[in-house]
Amino acid sequence: MRAVRGSDESPFVSLAVDGPLRPNLELLYKYRTAECLLSRGSFQKRGKPGPTNGGSGPELHKHATRLAQMVLRECEVEATKMPFSASNCGVYEAFPNLFLGILCEEQDYPMRPSRGRYWTDCLFPLVASRLDKLIRALLPQRNFEGVAKTNGHEPIAALVCAVTALAASDGQCVAVGSPADGYIVLPPIQLWGASAKDDSWAKRELREIVRRLSQKRVVVYSPKIYCGENLLDLNRD
């Protein structure tokens, strides 16, 4: 991190970490609203987030929180007005699997990766052009050749985390979760991949999941979906 920063001591605009983050960077190994929403329906077979309270989730949560705290200890990060930040600074939870997945057209969505491969690596070639479009919207004064030549799991995941941080700080994103236990940041809704009926498949799934969970009262904390700083009405927007 210090090597990347070099001698530039100006504040970071924002930070995104690929791992579960709770509000105020609290450590608490409980199942979260974002995980509940994004692990049902079609999401279940499209790179869903793991639970913070089981499997490798507790370790991932612990280390993601440590990484965020380390950056805040070593560097200044600009304050944020976004209601889905995990801190009063711009600290956001990235999830490269679904960030790329939501950009993908439903008809082009790849099969579940075979053992030893990752969702990010399978999805990236299919959505690189949309990722370019998002980067150009976030950094309109910058010139770049595009991201399609990015190779390797770690470089791809790191790139998606960086784009997530930019999108979140600029409000060009959707955030899914709850103020009680944190949010996962996803791409802006205008870039979401279409379903066979031309609507966004992810919007369709979220609408149905929220409806079902509200009937069953499964989600302990009221789920919220932000589009930038504003709450998103899935039935209208």
Image: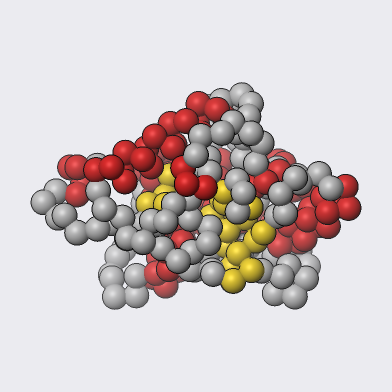
- The residue drawn where x is 61% and y is 24% is 55
Reply above or below: 59 against 149.
Answer: above
- The answer to whether any part of residue 199 appears in the image is no
Q: In the image as oriented, which residue stretches furthest toward the top?
A: 55
User: What is the quadrant of residue 102 in the picture?
Assistant: bottom right
Horizontal side of 82 relative to 191 (left or right) equals: left
Q: Position of residue 37 (x, y in %)?
A: 71, 48
Reply above or below: 91 against 131.
Answer: above
Horizontal side of 220 relative to 137 (left or right) equals: right
Quadrant where the C terminus sits is bottom right
Reply above or below: 206 against 153.
Answer: below
Quadrant where the N terminus sits is top left
Q: In the image as oriented, which residue stretches furthest toward the right?
A: 215
Report the front residue among 201 and 10.
Answer: 10
Q: Position of residue 13 (x, y in %)?
A: 32, 60
Reply above or below: 83 against 177.
Answer: below
Q: Position of residue 101 (x, y in %)?
A: 59, 51
Report the front residue among 195 and 188.
Answer: 188
- The residue drawn where x is 25% and y is 48% is 75
Horizontal side of 79 relative to 107 (left or right) equals: left
